[in-house]
Image (cartoon, grey):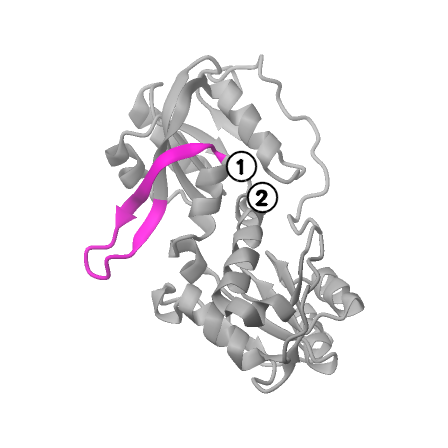
Amino acid sequence: MTVKPTTAFPTVLLSEVVAALERLYPVDTASSWDRVGLVTGDLDQPVSLVYFAVDPTLAVIDEARAAGADLLLTHHPLLLRGVHSVATTSAKGAAVTSLVVNDIALYVAHTNADVASPGVCDALASACGLVEVAPLEVDQISGTGHGRVGSLAHPLTLRDFAQRLSAALPKAVGGIRVAGPADARVTRVAVVGGAGDHMFDAVRDSGADVYVTADLRHHPALEAREEARGGTPYLVDAGHWATEWLWLESARSELVRELGERGASLETHICTLRTDPWDFVIGAATSEITGGTTC
């Protein structure tokens, strides 16, 4: 849904929007390997329409161009790894060219948005219905909080919890994968938006009954379940794109708030294109099929 301005204000410059974003999502809180901040654009260019998306794919850029966007704000970087050409013979080159030719600035808030408060993990915690939310782990040097952990207002079965979360998430082909007994009681929940199978130790230390994240690889997930001996923490893999798409509404409202009266002159739009890469599944096992069967 596009939110239209209600009052006429002087034009907002990209430099103002970038300054606001860097207050919300400080660049120095991003992981050392990450590439965040302004990717394309002139700081002196005016901004009237800001597009919010998880991924700067060609389809997303094309939709932003067609809508007349001046700024595309994405969670995932376009140029995370080094490139030696931005010719249109490659997808990344075509993306950069389209952004530049159409005067669309691209700004990335990635791992700095993951650890921000409110940020990606807060949005996922809210979708899970958590209260008394706290960081899952705190970096002892920087004091930065990673992930979130909290409690449900009322206990649920693992199946009911997963179904409620599914209703709050955008739909993706992979759906939600769950490891644990469907009728198990869930009260305490840990969350990490996007890929989170590197945080199992923190999840166990938190006493969480279930861990909601994405991109759970076979070996880390299997080892986590083996260590649990069939008990907690149970696992919910809710999909990378879906768990992070939730943050876009927070990013929009926080940016408008941070800009104050200047933010009232902006139009904003949250992209609903599904940039999850999968298109269909075949042969998925039903819930009646249990582990430990003969291969």
Judged left or right of residue 67, residue 275 is: left
What element does badge 2 sit on? helix
Which residue lies most toward the right here? 66
Verify whether residue 140 appears in magenta. yes
Judged left or right of residue 11, residue 228 is: left
The amino acid beneath tag 2 is Ala
How far, Cα to Cα, is label 2 from label 1? 7 Å
Q: Residue 106 in the image: x percent, y percent?
A: 60, 72
The amino acid beneath tag 1 is Ala
Main secondary structure along the magenta-highlighted residues: strand
Q: Residue 249 in the image: x percent, y percent?
A: 57, 52
- The circle on residue 238 is 1
**Residue at the location (49% across, 16% down)?**
182
Do we see residue 133 in this rendering? Answer: yes
**Residue at the location (39% across, 16% down)?**
185
What element does badge 1 sit on? loop
Do we see residue 72 in this rendering? Answer: no
Badge 1 crowding class, 10 Å Cα cut-off, few under 14, some 14 to 19, many 20 or more, is many
187 vs 291, nearest the viewer? 187
Judged left or right of residue 160, residue 100 is: right
Badge 2 crowding class, 10 Å Cα cut-off, few under 14, some 14 to 19, many 20 or more, is many
Where is residue 32, by image quadrant? bottom left
**Residue at the location (19% across, 60% down)?**
141
Magenta range is 128-147
Marks 1 and 2: in contact by CB < 8 Å? yes
Q: Residue 93 in the image: x percent, y percent?
A: 67, 75
Residue behind mark 2: 242
231 vs 73, nearest the viewer? 73
**Residue at the location (57% across, 58% down)?**
252
142 vs 281, nearest the viewer? 142
255 vs 114, nearest the viewer? 255
Q: Residue 247 in the image: x percent, y percent?
A: 53, 51
